[in-house]
Amino acid sequence: MTTTTAGGGVRARRPRALPLRYVVRKTVTAFGTLVFVVIVNFFLFRVLPGDPAKAFSPRGRNADPNRLAEIRRDLGLGLPWHEQFWAYVKNLASFDLGVSWGQHAPVSRLIGERLWPTVLLSGTALLLAAGIGMWLGARAGWRHGSRLDRVSSSGAVTLYSTPEWLLGLVLLIVLSDLGVIPAAGMQNPLSELPPALDIAWHMVAPVTVLAVVYIAEYSLIMRSSMLDERYADYLTTARAKGLRDDLVMRRHALPNALLPSITLFFLTLGFVVSGAIGVETVFNWPGLGRLTYDALRGPDVPLLQGLFLTFSAGVILMNLVADLLYPLLDPRVRAS
Amino acid sequence: MKTARSIAWARRRVALGAFWQGYRRDREGLFGLVVLVVFATVAIAAPLLADAEGLSLTKATGPRLAPPSLAYPFGTDEDGRSVLTEVIWGSRISLLVGLAATVISMVIGTLVGIGSGHFRGVGGGLLGRLTEWFLVIPYLPLAIVLATVFPPDVPRIIAVIIVIGVTSWSGTARLIRAQTLSIEERPYLERARALGGGHWHQMSRHILPNVMPLVLANTTLTVSIAILAETTLSFLGLGDPLRMSWGKILDNAYSGDVITSGAWWWALFPGLAVVLVVRAFNMCGRAIERVLDPRLRELA
Amino acid sequence: MISPARRLALAVTAALAALVLPAVPALAEDTPSPSAKTTFVLGIKQDIDSLNPYVGVVASAYEAYQLMYDYLTGSSEKDFSPVPGLAESWETSADGKTWTYHIRKGVKWSDGQDLTAKDVVYSFQRAIDGDTENGQYGNYVANITKVSATNDYTVVMETSEPSPSMLRLLVPILPEHTWSKVSGEDVGTFANDNAPVGSGPFKLVEAKKGQSYRFEANKQYWAGAPKIDELIIRVYADDAPLAQALRTSEVHMVNDISASVFESLMNQPNITTSDSKYSGFTELAYNVGAATVDGKAIGNGHPALKDKRVRLAIDHALDRNVLLDKVLRNHGTIASGVIPPIYADWHWNPGSAARAFDVAKANELLDQAGYPKGAGGVRAGPDGKKLEFRLFGRESSETSKKNVEYIRDWLKEIGITVTVSIMSEDQLTAVIGEGEYDMFEWGWVVEPDPDFQLSVFSCGQRSTEDGGEISAGWSDSFYCDESYDALYEKQKTILDPAARTAVIKEAQQHLYDNAVYSVLYYYNNFEAYRSDKFTGFVHQPSNGGSLVFQYGTYTYRNIAPVTNQTAQKRSLGGIALVIGVGAGLIALAGVAVVLFSRRRRVTADERE
């Protein structure tokens, strides 16, 4: 249902309105997935040996047994599981994620403090990667078989086969002695640079590492959808009309190839989360990823539970955004 | 007399032959295959190539953190063990975990995919829902959570295999579901039903053989994901602490201050091994896709 | 008519510009003029788990409490002997059960109020009464029956027995006027990170968990103002960035780094390393017979370990020199007793009677004890049960993971099969409390007063059972011996140091002769600092002890900058940053140009 006019290209559209039923349906589905995650989260950790009462007794080894029993009663640990589950859900609704065993602080506070550095790091890397990756993939896909295509695809497959943190590790080994990049962390309290600049300086290496691997992934995705478009029938018409090659790509193929890529962008956000954990660990970036690595020492069960929930909720939200955006962008799709 | 069964098998053999012909011509695929054969040989022949005692702390006699040399082609780690020995023996665990986890993932993914595509109603719908849920949940946090709650009595290596298998099946399931749905439309399936074929018969005799090519292509890609997952989990310290795998070497290196000591060989060689193997699997997967998809083949 | 592609490009450019452009005017400014104040930055590896003195358990937390608060008495920097703190002087009654402390006058809290006996009484009373508080400081106040203030500057404490540890009460004195607002229920999660009021040499100004903690010097400190103006404690999760930070002067001192990082810092210009003697030891611990304080057996330890000869045999089979060489790389000394040599007064050394590494002797002992080698080289007892032990190591410690591997290989030589498991410290604590282990590797950091360390081996510190629930005490050997308990109780109440020392040494010998632990080594603490920036570091004890994480804040109060340093103008890093940001902007512009200007495109030969 593409509309092509004499001038070629996809006409600018009035912002489309999404049918309410569609929005509601997608939101409900997303909520359903969240419910599933909450249930998994609850039951999974019931299996784990360990004592939640530990969070409240400063020295687990020396706690007064009476006090421990009292804490357990307060936490409702003796109750039947459905009551515990209900209490858990109620706490979730008020953003109470429990108390961290290792850091003796409310989990929601810890997560709140570390959310921004992760968003900053991953968000920047994603934006860069999406922009560069999609451009590269589009060119490579359009010039299928050309040197650019072969080299960039080959490079992309290699990068795609590399764990992000491994790149970071090797980079650090090679560069750390030279002092070219800061050793670790997000800020240097001694630095004379204004904070924003100091943070940006610390961001260069981890963002580069993350972006490089994502560029590979997005370029491959973009390339394959561009390939799908390249040989499509409707383009033959455009070429027959005498349109120049690059215009054919830009006005016809690219927009259509872009659409699945944009939605895939949101859908691959799960990998972003996974990548952040490794990279933040290696670069000591004080975000949720590093918090996860630290929580594994212990293991700090309430913190891990909270982090799992946060990561999943984030990805579910992004997927919902993708679902809602897609029909707005693609005239071919009826939001049914 | 030729039975329907033997006719079907004859046809499949011809298809297999054609597939191999096509694959042989694919340069990328061949290269990947060669690399995999090399690594498989190294893993199987590990006892012949490197002394197992070289992994033991008490028996390590090499110099600490020595750069690559004739005596130690990959250098040594901080305990004086040869990194080459570690990489050779590590290939066993990394490949084993990768393959075993893939088996689990493919079995679950195929069953759920076919099931959700074939069965209408509540059963299929539920399986479909399950697939969607697992697709959305980010894999590493889920793997971390599962690895943490595994009972400590289970040997860690089994735990890791199960964890990876259970977290990576959803992509496969979705693909197979889509394929199953398209197969469901085909006339011969209707005929099979009319002839009284039950669900099991339909799924195993008709659907399964037809999704097999897709499963195959997907398997290689799943293995590469599984090996990456094992490496990452070991690096984070969730792997088996007593067995050497490539991820474990990297974990040792990171905890052993490889960055400060600048002992690049300690991280580079196991890292290269991971990248090479995973890339090889990816190359094979892309080649299989090209051979199976006639449209892509034209473009090659 | 903006295509989606262009829209995307615009969005990306806008996002990046929003991030980077605000920095451009900042770059154009001059660098801010260097402030005149001196700042000392300490890099640590373990984050302060809580700034609340009733909650934190890690060493860095205790360091922070020492900075913020005062104690009644302190430990001398020369030899740990008690010195006056907030208590200027003290008296003991003849029966040793009443202690009178005279509180220093003129000490002020950081909010200007006076510190009086009322605050001291409040702090101790809270430690006695509060559940959470007592869990933290219980072993210091267990003996105290009554604490009261007879006037504004005198505190009297009554104890049930004479107790020498009354001069080592490491209970921080907190201001009653702020802490009375924190209830017993809230104290467990109270963060105490918002400009807490204290009387110590430093005041907490800013806390960024996991990153850095900023303290301002208390220029009115009663023991003399610190010479520096500001102290920042920066948290690094790993050794590599910590060492790097020291090399680039991002931090001025590092503590508790690993051996390999320490060695990479030795002989570096402008860096002084200190292989400091430390108060810790590492041991191989045995399950000597897990039972509760009521004598009820718990867990599933191997019965053979109850036999002293088996433990002695194992001890003979451990080649401590190899551990010292390979694992510690000679940064430590071989150990025998549980009080490290840093406490010169209390430390006991077996001298020539020390057990040697002797595999033949080990085999002999096991044969004598009735565990002959069977087929396959594994020993078995009279009941046919093989000597197969579980050995647990700790996930968080690299040396632990190595030690257990060595031990496993050595025990194989004498016919004992060892299965190694690595687990987290929390899990190990739980396992020990339930008695479900045979051996494990861990360590202790010993306080200046040996009472607590010796108590760990007494019958009373074993697990307790309450309504089916087993709670761990401090004992991780489950050793229970009447004669040892007698020694322990005796030293608890002797006030005369010389007499007490004799009993303490006897106690150490008892533990050694019975191989309750196989103490492996005393490890050193690795510290390094920039000698070109600061001077005046104080060792505790003076012959090569630790510089920081001491029992006291001597170093922090004594260090001063080497010269009057002006802050560097536009460091190399800054230049690199400018280049980097500039390059980034150019690259961005490049991408934008390419995306937007497709008009001038060579045509014919670009087609497929």
Image (tube, rainbow, N blue to C red):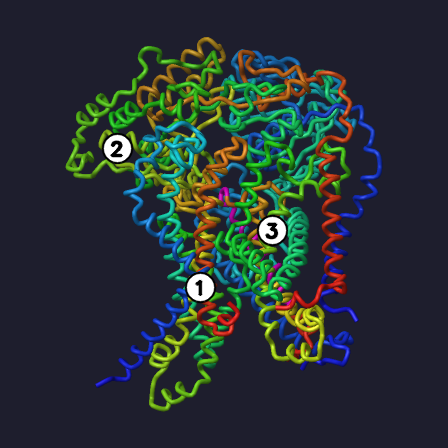
* Labels 2 and 1 in the same subunit: no
The residue to which callout 3 is attached is A212
Q: Is residue C580 magenta?
A: no
Q: Are marks 2 and 3 in contact (CB under 8 Å)?
A: no
Residue in the picture at 39% in, 46% down = C468
Corner quadrant of residue C482:
top left
Q: Would you call the spot at circle 1 few (<14 residues within 10 Å), some (14-19), or many (20 or more)?
A: some
Corner quadrant of residue A176:
top right
Q: Amino acid at mark 1?
A: Asp
Q: Position of residue C342 (x, y in %)?
A: 49, 16
Q: Amino acid at mark 2?
A: Lys
The residue to which callout 1 is attached is B26
Task: Report the magenta residues as a range.
Answer: A297-322
Residue in the picture at 43% in, 70% down = B214
Left or right: where does residue C605 sit relative to residue C299? right
- With respect to residue C558, does B95 lie above or below? below
In the foreground, A264 or C143: A264
Q: Amino acid at mark 3?
A: Val
Q: Position of residue C133 (x, y in %)?
A: 58, 35
The residue to which callout 2 is attached is C412
Corner quadrant of residue C81:
top right
